[in-house]
Structure formats: structure tokens, C-alpha cells
Amino acid sequence: MKYTHVIFDLDGTLLNTIDDLTDAGNHVCAARGWPAHTVAEFKLMVGNGIPKLVERFSPPGTDGETLAAALAEFSAWYAAHSEDRTAPYPGVPEALASLKGAGVRMAVLSNKADAIAGPLVERYFPGVFEAVQGALPGVPAKPDPTLLHKLLERLGASPETTLFVGDSNVDVRTGKNGGLPVCGVLWGFRDRAELEEAGADRFACTAEELRQIILG
């Protein structure tokens, strides 16, 4: 079938942001004398929003006040360095241009802070997406479907003809919680086994394969 709407995750799906996220996290760790983490470790820590990421890279038992300070330090550093090494995945800009040309309406739903997500998407994919929704204070993050439902309503999209695309179990659960079919991409931060276990309906190894799935 052809999908009329597609909602994409951002990190690990459209943009390879892991190096900048790792650098920001390790900047905080170095400043506080905490152990640094590898890129592979950060790939397993991201996905549930920045506060959870900070909690995960901080030493076990870190108190709430220290976590709050580390979060502020991370957010300030990342805001200034979020484009140092970030780039679209191969073939993604071309696939998005083709989909837009075919009349597919697209949006982004990310657990990245809303103030960062919007400008980042527009920087790398200008004019492609009708809406970009990042994490908001006081609103449950993915995989809770609250912001997904708001996005569907904003787009006037039907769950039956809207595909959710992401690279982690968080994304698969988000789509499923919102009643959407889900395509897992295999170029991101997590592996096929995780996506299969979470219940992804389809899989794409390349951006071109994803484009063909969307266009039916």
C-alpha cells in the first residue's frame, strides 16, 4: 500500500547525531571527573530523551541535584555543538525529496528537546517536513503516544495510512501505542533483533528501500 503520511524519528533515523551526543556527554563526564563512555555505549543510552540520557551516563546513585546540574551542563554544550559532526544518513535527503515530490506528507517526532529538534531538522532538511515535534516539559515522551496523537491531529492524518519510521524499540512502541504500522530502519543506533522483539512490521536496510516501502 502507499502511505499518505509518514512520521519519522530523528536521531538514528534521519540524522546520525551519535558523535555529537557522545561528545556532549563525555564533556560533562570529564568536567565532573566521571568515567567516559564509548560511542557504542551511547548508542544504547539514547532514545528516551536527554534527561534519561544524562541519568544513564552518570555514575550509579548520583543524586537528583547533581543530575539536574549535569543536565544543564549537557544541554548548554549540546546546543552549541549539535552540528559539529552530525549529518544525514546516506540517501536520506534524496529519498525525502522523492517522497515529497510524490505528495507524501511528512513530520518528525523526536525525544530531543523541541527547541533543538525544530532548528536541527530545518537546517538539514529545509522545507521538507510539515511539522516537527520535540520533547516538551511536563508532557510524556515517546513511547507514550500523547505527542504522536497531537501530531496526527495537526496533520489530519489517519493512523491506518500513516507509517511510523524509527531505529529503536522506543520508536516501535511509540507507533504501536498510537495504532500505526511501523518500519524499523537498520542503519541507526540499534539492531534488527531489538526492532523485531518490539514488533516492527517492516524493515528497511537503505533509504531507497524505505522510499519504496512508503510508495508501495
Image: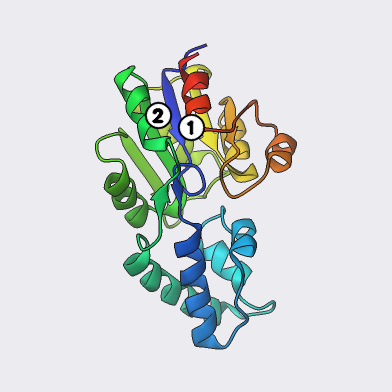
Image vertical order of residue 173 relative to residue 12, above or below: above
Residue 48 position in % (x across, y down): 56, 54
**Among the 4 quarters of the image, the one containing residue 20:** bottom left
Image vertical order of residue 132 relative to residue 209, above or below: below
Query: Which residue corresponds to mark 2?
Result: 95
Residue 64 position in % (x across, y down): 57, 77
The extreme left residue here reads 127
What secondary structure is found at the residue carrying circle 1? helix
The residue sitting at 46% across, 16% down in the picture is: 215
Q: What type is the residue that disc 2 sits on?
A: Ala
Residue 163 position in % (x across, y down): 51, 25
- Find out whether the residues at labels 1 and 2 contact each other: C-beta distance under 8 Å: yes
The residue sitting at 55% across, 69% down in the picture is: 54
- Label 1, label 2: how far apart the Cα atoms are: 6 Å
Which badge, 1 or 2, is on the more N-terminal residue?
2
The residue sitting at 49% across, 40% down in the picture is: 146
The residue sitting at 32% across, 24% down in the picture is: 100
Query: Which residue corresponds to mark 1?
Result: 207
Mark 1: give few (<14), some (14-19) or many (20+) Cα within 10 Å.
Answer: many
Q: What type is the residue that disc 1 sits on?
A: Ala
